[in-house]
Image (cartoon, helix red, strand yellow):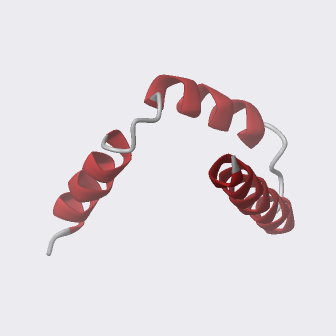
């Protein structure tokens, strides 16, 4: 599978999540301003994963 096909598939998967892509991109752009090193990126990634899991667990416990 070509890189172009992979990117299109990934884009389609993101669009099918029901998440407002415009808001998500704006939020990601703001977060990216504070990323200066790979360590910054790793910490941000870990924090986002943790927050997402916590939010999902809270949502499903209701």
Which one is nearer the viewer's eye here, 48 or 6? 48
Q: Residue furthest front?
A: 62
| Residue 15 place in picture, x, y as percent | 33, 40
In the depicted structure, whether residue 1 falls above or below residue 32: below
| Residue 23 place in picture, x, y as percent | 56, 24
Q: Is residue 35 left or right of residue 19?
A: right
Q: Residue furthest bottom?
A: 1
Quadrant of residue 53 within the rendered picture: bottom right
Quadrant of residue 3 within the rendered picture: bottom left
Picture residue at 32% right of the left edge, 56% below the top: 10
Which one is nearer the viewer's eye here, 20 or 59? 59
In the depicted structure, whether residue 4 falls above or below residue 32: below
Q: Is residue 1 left or right of residue 42?
A: left
- Count of marks placed on residues: 0
In the depicted structure, whether residue 46 falls above or below residue 11: below
In the depicted structure, whether residue 38 falls above or below residue 56: below
Which one is nearer the viewer's eye here, 37 or 6? 6
Q: Is residue 61 left or right of residue 33?
A: left
Picture residue at 77% right of the left edge, 57% below the top: 54
Quadrant of residue 33 within the rendered picture: top right
Quadrant of the snapshot with the N terminus: bottom left
Picture residue at 78% right of the left edge, 53% below the top: 51
| Residue 14 place in picture, x, y as percent | 37, 47
Which one is nearer the viewer's eye here, 31 or 58? 58
């Amino acid at each position: 599978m070509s890189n172009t096909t992979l990117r299109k598939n990934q884009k389609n998967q993101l669009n099918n999540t029901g998440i407002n892509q415009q808001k998500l991109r704006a939020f990601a752009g703001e977060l990216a301003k504070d990323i200066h090193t790979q360590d910054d990126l790793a910490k941000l990634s870990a924090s986002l994963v943790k927050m997402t899991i916590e939010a999902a667990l809270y949502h499903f416990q209701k």
